[in-house]
Image: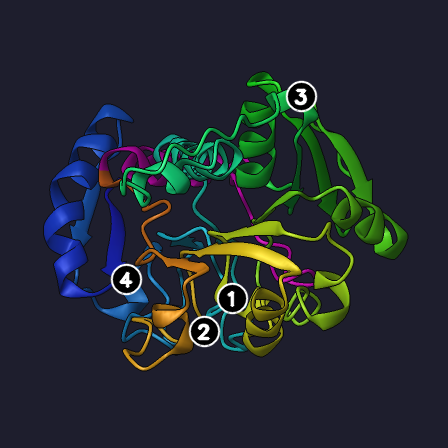
């Protein structure tokens, strides 16, 4: 039987996803009618991006699941019209891309690469970094991305601590949770990586109080979500020397406005939300597998817990 799949995302996404999705459906043995325009009452699954025009799900009376193209679901999880299962995107390409970006910037700050890249002025600056085993790296967030990045850094020899709201376990990482655990995790965070989801509980988790709990001169790396950081508090901590540098890939408003203080601050590196992007080829395989599962009566992968918001 033909399965009707609605692609509900911006048109430029359709151009990059159409062929990979069709190939993945074929490889999974699925007979799929894939379109950007289907009668709502005939839709079985929705491949979705939260900036889609589709915001009212009540019309999709036979739909079985919404399959998000992004890892983040904060812009859809609270939609009161969405009553069917919602799956977030967890795929190899997304995870590997994040590992590479995070590892690259952790090594950049660990080795103080900026000193030599930006200091080509004839001055012989011989500063020897410690070994990775003597560098404390803390990951806030031990979901799929955080655990993968932390494990990769641990394999390089870094002393990695991870913190999550609920208890977790990850290879090579000292795992902490709860309010006391957060203070402990921040206390060893010479390099602090933010990979938490954005929820009411995590908004401004880096604020004046928590920034002060990090070692003086700590580095902040944020490829997670912009609202995890109180921007004014971070700027004050940078100016005071409590934070040595911030490499930021995500922001409350994107693109980051041209007049935002981060652009001109000498201790801030801005990257344009490139830490990790959903790759159509690998994401299509994840979507096809979830549709195969739905058709076979098997549990969906990567379902969002509405009570937690991720």
Tell me whether the residue at label 4 lies in contact with that at label 2, contact meaning CB atoms closer than 8 angstroms. no
Q: For this rendering, which residue is in front, 236 or 91?
A: 236
The mark nearer the N terminus, 3 or 2, is: 3
Determine crowd level at label 4: few under 14, some 14-19, many 20+ residues with C-alpha closer than 10 A: some
Residue segment shown in magenta: 281-310
Is 301 a magenta residue? yes
**Which type of secondary structure does the marked residue at label 3 adopt?**
helix
Determine crowd level at label 3: few under 14, some 14-19, many 20+ residues with C-alpha closer than 10 A: few
Tell me the residue that label 2 is attached to: 252
- At x 49%, y 61%, the residue is 73
As drawn, 153 above or below 10: above
Left or right side of 100 for 151: right
Tell me the residue that label 4 is attached to: 42
Q: Which mark is residue 133?
A: 3
Q: What is the x, y in percent for residue 5?
A: 26, 52
**Which type of secondary structure does the marked residue at label 2 adopt?**
loop
Left or right side of 182 for 34: left
Q: What is the x, y in percent for residue 20?
A: 17, 37
Is 144 a magenta residue? no
* Disc 3 versus disc 1: nearer the observer: 3
Q: How many angstroms separate mark 2 from mark 1 (CA)?
A: 13 Å
Tell me the residue that label 1 is attached to: 74
The mark nearer the N terminus, 4 or 2, is: 4
Q: What is the x, y in percent for residue 122?
A: 28, 37
User: Looking at the rendering, in which quadrant would you find the C terminus?
Assistant: bottom right
The answer to whether residue 37 shows anywhere in this view is no
Q: What is the x, y in percent for residue 30?
A: 26, 33
Q: How many angstroms separate mark 3 from mark 2 (CA)?
A: 34 Å
């Amino acid at each position: 039987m033909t399965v009707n799949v609605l692609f509900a995302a911006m048109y430029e996404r359709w151009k990059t996803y159409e062929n990979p999705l069709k190939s993945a459906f074929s490889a999974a043995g699925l007979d799929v009618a894939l379109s950007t325009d289907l009668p709502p009452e005939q839709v079985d699954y929705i491949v979705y991006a939260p900036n889609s025009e589709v915001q009212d799900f009540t019309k999709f009376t036979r739909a079985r699941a919404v399959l998000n193209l992004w890892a983040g679901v904060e812009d859809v999880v609270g939609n009161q019209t969405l009553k069917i299962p919602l799956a977030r995107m967890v795929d190899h390409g997304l995870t590997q891309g994040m590992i590479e970006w995070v590892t690259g910037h952790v090594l950049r700050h660990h080795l103080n690469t900026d000193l030599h890249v930006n200091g080509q002025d004839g001055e012989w600056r011989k500063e020897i970094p410690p070994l990775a085993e003597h560098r404390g790296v803390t990951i806030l967030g031990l979901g799929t991305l955080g655990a993968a990045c932390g494990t990769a850094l641990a394999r390089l020899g870094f002393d990695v601590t991870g913190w999550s709201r609920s208890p977790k376990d990850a290879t090579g990482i000292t795992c902490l949770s709860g309010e006391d655990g957060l203070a402990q995790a921040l206390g060893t965070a010479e390099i602090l990586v933010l990979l938490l989801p954005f929820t009411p509980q995590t908004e401004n988790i880096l604020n004046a109080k928590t920034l002060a709990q990090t070692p003086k001169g700590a580095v902040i790396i944020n490829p997670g979500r912009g609202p995890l950081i109180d921007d004014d508090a971070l700027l004050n901590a940078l100016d005071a020397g409590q934070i040595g540098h911030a490499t930021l890939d995500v922001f409350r408003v994107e693109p980051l406005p041209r007049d935002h203080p981060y652009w001109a601050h000498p201790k801030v590196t801005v990257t344009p939300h490139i830490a990790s992007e959903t790759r159509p080829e690998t994401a299509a395989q994840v979507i096809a597998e979830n549709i195969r599962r739905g058709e076979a009566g098997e549990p969906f992968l990567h379902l969002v817990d509405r009570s937690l918001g991720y």
